[in-house]
Amino acid sequence: MQLVKERADGGCERVAPLVFDDQTFNREVTFCRVYSQESKKKLEKLFLQNRISYFIEWQERFLFARLFGGKRQREKNVFTVRINEADVERATELAKGIEDVRLRDAG
């Protein structure tokens, strides 16, 4: 399979497609949940300083869950942090002791 790309001067170039058969690139795992903006900022800063790539998914808590869900659920925002599985051990050491961060269960 080849793709043909038209050039500005009217000519054509042949471009080989990228083939990703039997290759896995997405090694992202859920690392933790964060229950406050301040803790999220601390964690982000640590990850940036230590060159750990991450993705943060914001989850808004509904009023009912905030009222009856216990101390952790009273925060309006909950953040799920995902990182590359190769960085889990190092990130765990960095995240220890940060308030309002709940690490995922190993296993």
Image (cartoon, helix red, strand yellow):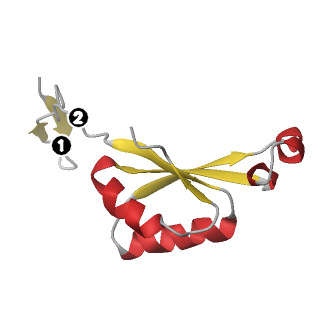
Mark 2 or 1: the one toward you:
2
Who is closer to the viewer here, 68 or 77? 68
Q: Earlier in the sequence, mark 2 or mark 1?
A: 1
**Rendered position, 100 above or below 72:** below
Q: Are marks 2 and 1 in contact (CB under 8 Å)?
A: no
Q: Which residue is mark 2?
A: 24
Please give the name of the residue rendered at 11% of the width and 23% of the height, measured from the top-left corner. 1
Q: What residue type is disc 2 on?
A: Thr
Furthest residue toward top:
1
Task: Indicate the quadrant where residue 3 lies.
Answer: top left
User: What number of labels is visible?
Assistant: 2
Local packing at callout 2 (Cα closer than 10 Å; few below 14, some 14-19, many 20+) is few
**Rendered position, 60 above or below 20:** below
| 96 on left or right of 1 | right
Please give the name of the residue rendered at 68% of the width and 51% of the height, measured from the top-left corner. 78
SS type, badge 2: loop
Who is closer to the viewer here, 102 or 64? 102
| 73 on left or right of 25 | right
Q: Position of residue 101 (x, y in %)?
A: 58, 59
Q: What residue type is disc 1 on?
A: Gly
Distance of mark 2 from mark 1, alpha carbons?
Answer: 38 Å
Who is closer to the viewer here, 70 or 45? 70
Local packing at callout 1 (Cα closer than 10 Å; few below 14, some 14-19, many 20+) is few
Q: Kindly identify which numbered label has been placed on residue 10.
A: 1
| 66 on left or right of 23 | right
| 5 on left or right of 99 | left
Q: Position of residue 86 (x, y in %)?
A: 27, 52
